[in-house]
Image (cartoon, rainbow, N blue to C red):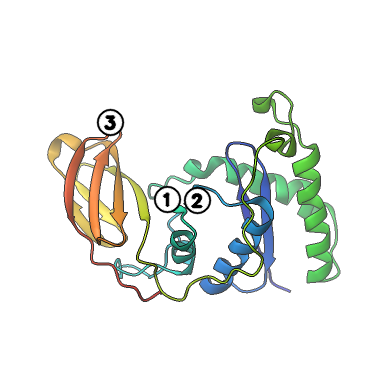
Amino acid sequence: AQFHALNLIDVGSHLAGNDIITELRPPLLAQALAGIWSRVGLPVVAQFDNHANFRGGIQPAWQHFGPIVATCLDLGITPRFIPLREPWRNGVVEHFNDVWDKSFFRTETFTSINHLRTENSAFIEFHNTHHRYSTHNGASPHQMWQGTQRRPLSTAYQPPTKLPAQGRIEVVRYIRSNRQLDLFGKRITIADEHTHRYVTAIIRVRARHLTVVTLDGEIIHQGNFNLSRILR
């Protein structure tokens, strides 16, 4: 049987959560992500790569976002998209994906999806309880959270069916010599002095407004970003 593992990790504590899903459909991904957040708690920012499953509409439908972005906005979470073709920006979760694959998935034969889900849950719990990280002075993810309140999402939560008119979306991009800022197919020309630098595009959803800032916080572009409320 075909399946996909949706893995999530908290960069501050290395607390992991995941779900095994059998179909890659954005509404199911959003529901799975909400389920993970009901177990590990809600983040302030959720970082994704630029795949349409996470972002939404296929280029050049830049004005459309999908169920995962809508869920983030609905819950007061800022979705942040990493620069194009820079997978190392998600290095923490990529490393965990490798650990999950080599230390868990390839070490056992699974008789069914339910068997995989049961063993996977046990592996995630073992990781969070027992995996020691040198960056945390040998503490496990659960130990890093001791005395701190996580914000678990209600298991009754249902993702929205339209883009909520609230919150912000952040898109990090590297400006090359062509001076083009590519926001999922919407292209904006940036002043020459900002080439070969990283910028963050901040889309304010209710105002349908775009602000582009440098790493120093300097505003280098402002304009409209005509979002659609329809999810794609």
Q: Which residue is mark 2?
A: 46
Numbered disc 1: secondary structure: strand
Up the image or down, 37 lies above or below 10; here it is below
- The label on residue 80 is 1
The answer to whether the residues at label 2 and label 1 have Cβ atoms under 8 Å apart is yes
- The three-letter code of the residue at mark 2 reads Ala
What residue do we see at 27% from left, 54% from top? Answer: 182
What residue do we see at 71% from left, 51% from top? Answer: 101
- The three-letter code of the residue at mark 1 reads Arg
Q: Quadrant of the C terminus?
A: bottom left
Numbered disc 2: secondary structure: strand
Q: How far apart are the two marked residues, 3 and 1, measured between alpha carbons?
A: 18 Å
**Residue 200 lies in what quarter of the image?**
top left
Q: Residues within 10 Å of mark 2 (few under 14, many from 20)?
A: some
- The label on residue 216 is 3
What residue do we see at 15% from left, 34% from top? Answer: 193
Q: How far apart are the two marked residues, 2 and 1, measured between alpha carbons?
A: 6 Å
Q: How far apart are the two marked residues, 3 and 2, measured between alpha carbons?
A: 22 Å
**Mark closer to the chain start, 3 or 2:** 2
